[in-house]
Amino acid sequence: MFTEERAMIDQIDKEMVALFEERMNVVTSVAHKKEAAGLPILDSSREQQVLEKVVSYLQNEAYSPYLREFYTALMATSRQYQADHIKK
């Protein structure tokens, strides 16, 4: 019944995982630079900028609160990863 849609979602998920891994590789680099500079993991103003920027990329504004929720969780995951991998 949903074969085509599920196949499309599977392909999108595959692409999203690759992008997530790429993003986390960059997060690792950022974590090392923050550690070397003695900077805190959380930069609230940067996170707010990211949220505003990604929302501006939307074509369908109805998705805005959901994209904000998604990115808020993604950035929390990134912070947790940084906390687990740098000594602060």
Image: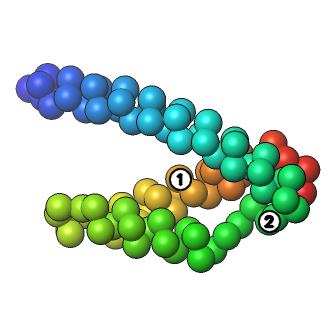
Query: Which residue is found at the position 67% from the left and 70% from the top?
Result: 43
For the C terminus, which image quadrant?
A: bottom right
* Residue 10 in view here: yes
For residue 12, what is the image quadrant?
top left
For the N terminus, which image quadrant?
A: top left
For residue 37, what is the image quadrant?
bottom right
Q: Amino acid at mark 2?
A: Pro
Horizontal and vertical percent position of residue 51: 44, 68
Most foreground residue, 68 or 46: 46
From the viewer's perspective, tell me whether residue 54 is left or right of residue 61: right
Horizontal and vertical percent position of residue 11: 28, 26
Question: SS class of the residue under badge 1?
Answer: helix
Question: Which residue does the numbered mark 2 point to in the structure image?
Answer: 40
From the viewer's perspective, tell me whether residue 88 is left or right of residue 10: right
Question: Which residue does the numbered mark 1 point to in the structure image?
Answer: 74
From the viewer's perspective, tell me whether residue 48 is left or right of residue 25: left
Query: Which residue is found at the position 44% from the left and 63% from the top?
Result: 69
In the picture, the disc for residue 33 is none
Most foreground residue, 61 or 3: 61
Q: Are marks 1 and 2 in contact (CB under 8 Å)?
A: no
Query: Which residue is found at the position 86% from the left and 53% from the top?
Result: 36
Q: Amino acid at mark 1?
A: Leu
Question: SS class of the residue under badge 2?
Answer: loop
Horizontal and vertical percent position of residue 29: 70, 43
* Residue 6 in view here: no
Q: Which is more foreground, mark 1 or mark 2?
A: 2
Alpha carbons under labels 1 and 2: distance apart: 18 Å
Query: Which residue is found at the position 62% from the left and 51% from the top?
Result: 77
Q: Does 47 sit above or below residue 4? A: below
Query: What colouring style does the render use?
Result: rainbow
Looking at the image, is mark 1 or mark 2 earlier in the sequence? 2
